[in-house]
Image (cartoon, helix red, strand yellow):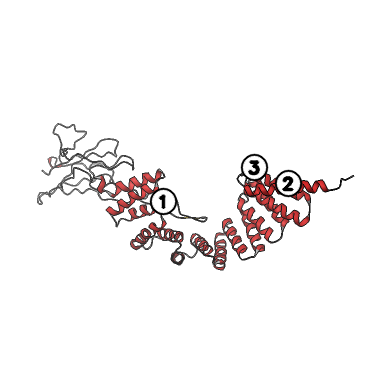
Amino acid sequence: MPSMIAQRLSILPLVLACLLAAGCSGRGGQADANRPASAPAIEDDGSGAIIEDIPPAALSPAATKPATTSPDAPPATASPDAPPATISPDAPPATVVPALASRPAVEPVTRPAALIHVAQPPSAEQPAPTLAPIPTSAPAPDSDPNFYIAAGDRALAKNDPNSAVKMMYRAVELDPTRLSGLRALAVSLVAARRFAEVVPIYDSILGMDPNDQTARFNLALALSRVRDFGRAERQYRELLAKDERSIEAWYNLAMLYQAQGRLEDARQTWLRVIDLSGDMASAHCFLGEIYMDLHRPADAMESFAKAAKLKPDEVSAWVNLAAAAREAGSYGRAIVAIHQAAEVAPQDALVQYRLGELLLELHRATDKPELLTEAIAAWKKSLKFDPSQNELAKKLARLEAAATTQTATQPATP
């Protein structure tokens, strides 16, 4: 009779047992299942990095029982001194299935196919093969990449990216060809803002999987951070060769051109983003900045006005609209825009400062004293919200003194 091993299946609510006869095969090996990424995306002046989901640590195939604990727990280790499991002849029938060889006819046992496979008894003509020995212990944690990936994930969850980097580097050292480990290391390096180090990691990932578009996108972002603009542009162009309607790739390419001062390239690329997206407030804002740099304030005013209309609660759109209108000589529209910004953010020191500037300029252009009074009131609010503005405090003191002198020298009205 072939030897028999009793095996418990902890995933069933009721303890079952089976006989592992000759020819019975088990399921083993590691499977990299998807898990959510725990690191922040690369921030690139308004654009979000897309971070690849990193598969969690899978249990080692040498483990003798399925994991039932949390993903954070280290792999269970069985004692090497523990005797192999045996079937006691006195065991109750609820936990032991009698040997198949002792029963001429056996009804098939109904179990979920995904959980267990029961082999048929070996024929009399063929000798029963010898069963492979079952390991009595799991790999030691310091030699298991999964252990370090799980530890790195816990460090990221605690907002400790540098510790996570150490753990992920160790996991990659143990298994340099494992994509999930490389991706986990890349996420940790991005979270730690170690962009120079993450570039070769993404190069390795793309060397193993050239079709990983997420890795290519993140590589381009990292290259932008280390100011390797030429290579970053090539990565975006490769992405666009795969999908010419990728708004994310066009958006980041426009940001790349703008960072380099390639204003005309940036202008045309922002127009492409707006065309593909239907309308995007941030794209209009960046386009407005391009027009300001190109000394086209009227076009900038139009772009900022569209951005403010799309996102009326965005303070920067109204402030930029006011600046463009002021540059274009439209003080009335500038003051309307900055008043709108003040309604959105009534306690914003910068908004009140800009309002005071515009009112003072309009006072000087029209010589209307009430505008000076309004400018002084706006600056007082700005100082109240941010008392550290020493230069503004001095400027305000001079203006108040001048206003008092001017009022004292005016003839009394009847």
Q: Nearer the viewer, residue 127 or 335?
A: 335
Image spot of residue 52 (x, y percent): 40, 54
The quadrant in which the N terminus is found is: top left
Q: Which residue is mark 2?
A: 400
For residue 163, side relative to residue 8 (left or right): right
The three-letter code of the residue at mark 2 reads Glu
Q: Which residue is mark 3?
A: 384
Identify the element where label 2 is drawn.
helix
Residue at (34, 63) in percent of width and height: 207
Q: Quadrant of residue 322?
A: bottom right
Q: Which mark is residue 192?
A: 1
For residue 55, side relative to residue 312 (left or right): left
Image spot of residue 342 (x, y percent): 66, 47
Residue at (74, 47) in percent of width and height: 401
Task: Determine the CA span between mark 2 and mark 3.
Answer: 16 Å
Task: Determine the CA span between mark 2 and mark 1.
Answer: 50 Å
Q: Nearer the viewer, residue 19 or 174?
A: 174
Q: Is residue 271 visible?
A: yes
The three-letter code of the residue at mark 3 reads Lys
Image spot of residue 169 (x, y percent): 32, 52
Q: Quadrant of residue 266?
A: bottom right
Identify the element where label 1 is drawn.
loop
* In the image, farthest residue toward the right: 414
The three-letter code of the residue at mark 1 reads Ala
Query: Callout 3: 10 Å neighbours few (<14), some, many (20+)?
Result: few
